[in-house]
Amino acid sequence: MKKSFRPVARLLLPLLCLPLLGAVSGIGGQHAVAPALAADDSGEIRLTVRGSGLPVPRFVTLKSDNVNMRAGPGTEYPILWHYRKTGLPLRVEAEFGVWRKVVDHDGTTGWMHHSVVSLKRMVLVTTSSARLYTEADDGAGLVAVAERNALLELQSCPTQWCRVAAGDIRGWVSRTSLWGLIEGEVLN
């Protein structure tokens, strides 16, 4: 049974952080914990407490085929899902120490330890199929057709076309067929 913890997590994380921030804020005028708050284009605030320093949101991938998603940032929280697909892309929404709040392609939200995710970029085909071309053009030669849920290595994405690879196959695919990119993101 799938349970949604999204509303609770959005309320609890800021509330849990406030006492922590107040308790460590005054030793010699220096902060032991420095939260980073940033608003994106939607006006939603992203929270990073003692995180990696990398931008949030961003995409990461699973390092192995044995990863747990938890209800909160710690091993004391229950496991919501068990992931069994190496390379699956996830969007990092927030950071709390060594924990990353992630969202998968289905919209499932939870927390994972930083050691189980990688900065390697992969994308997931979300349409029924995606055509890979020799060049970034519908009129170019067809290289292959990737089926729904196929994982492709993301090599670059300078425009509305992305260069991807799967084994020895390389080609260009329309970014509208893919999940694993932030809207407007340019990768060279």
Image (cartoon, rainbow, N blue to C red):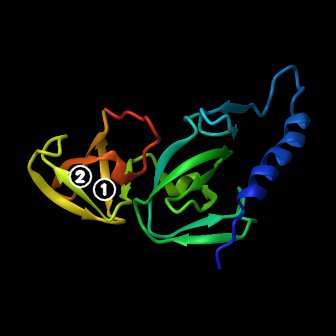
Q: In terms of depth relative to the viewer, which is nearer, 103 or 145?
A: 145
Tag 1 secondary structure = strand
Q: Residues within 10 Å of mark 1 (few under 14, many from 20)?
A: many
Numbered tag placed on residue 77 in the rendering: none
Q: Residue furthest left?
A: 141
The residue at the point 31 percent across, 34 percent down is 159
Q: Residues within 10 Å of mark 2 (few under 14, many from 20)?
A: some
* Rendered-image quadrant of the C terminus: top left
Picture quadrant where residue 20 is located: top right
- Whole-percent x and y of residue 86? 41, 64
Question: Could you tell which of marks 2 and 1 lies nearer the N-terminus?
Answer: 1
Q: Residue furthest top?
A: 29
Query: Does 29 sit above or below residue 142?
Result: above
Three-letter code, disc 1:
Leu
Does the residue at mark 2 contact the one at mark 1 (Cβ under 8 Å)? yes
The residue at the point 78 percent across, 58 percent down is 8
Three-letter code, disc 2:
Ala
Task: Give the CA distance from mark 2 to mark 1.
Answer: 6 Å
- Whole-percent x and y of residue 104? 53, 59
Disc 2: which residue: 165
The residue at the point 81 percent across, 23 percent down is 30
Picture quadrant where residue 46 is located: top right
Picture quadrant where residue 50 is located: top right
Numbered tag placed on residue 152 in the rendering: 1
Q: Is residue 52 left or right of residue 185?
A: right
Query: Does 162 sit above or below residue 102?
Result: above
* Rendered-image quadrant of the N terminus: bottom right
Q: Is residue 75 left or right of residue 104?
A: right
Q: Is residue 97 left or right of residue 29?
A: left
Tag 2 secondary structure = strand
The residue at the point 72 percent across, 59 percent down is 72
